[in-house]
Amino acid sequence: MKAVDLKKLSGTELDAKLLELKDELFKLRFQQAINQLDNPMRIKAVRKDIARIKTIQREVELHGKSS
């Protein structure tokens, strides 16, 4: 997901998306542990999406929604 799209979401939507991605990351890591992971690059993409959401949440915390 692009950062521009994430900035349009509200705080509660960002929290929900973050929980969803963390759950997906857990499932992907579990699949990797039992050698059933189809696309190992998906782990990297999910981790980057989590980092994007956390960055946007921090920006809002520091500067408010106007930034």
Image (spheres, helix red, strand yellow):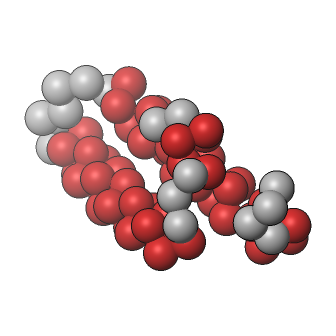
Q: Could you say where residue 55 lies in the image, as x and y percent from the top left?
A: 70, 54
| Residue 65 versus residue 32 in the image, above or below | below
- The residue shown at (87%, 67%) is 63
Q: Could you say where residue 67 lies in the image, as x and y percent from the top left?
A: 82, 56
Camera-side residue of 41 and 13: 13
Q: Residue furthest front?
A: 66
Q: Is residue 64 left or right of residue 12?
A: right
Camera-side residue of 24 and 4: 4
Q: Is residue 64 left or right of residue 52?
A: right
Residue 33 appears in the picture as rendered: no
- The residue shown at (67%, 64%) is 57
- The residue shown at (19%, 44%) is 31
- The residue shown at (54%, 34%) is 2
Q: Classify residue 58 by image quadrant.
A: bottom right
Residue 23 appears in the picture as rendered: yes
Q: Could you say where residue 8 lies in the image, as x and y percent from the top left?
A: 56, 52
Q: Is residue 59 left or right of residue 52?
A: right
Camera-side residue of 49 and 38: 49
| Residue 62 versus residue 42 in the image, above or below | below
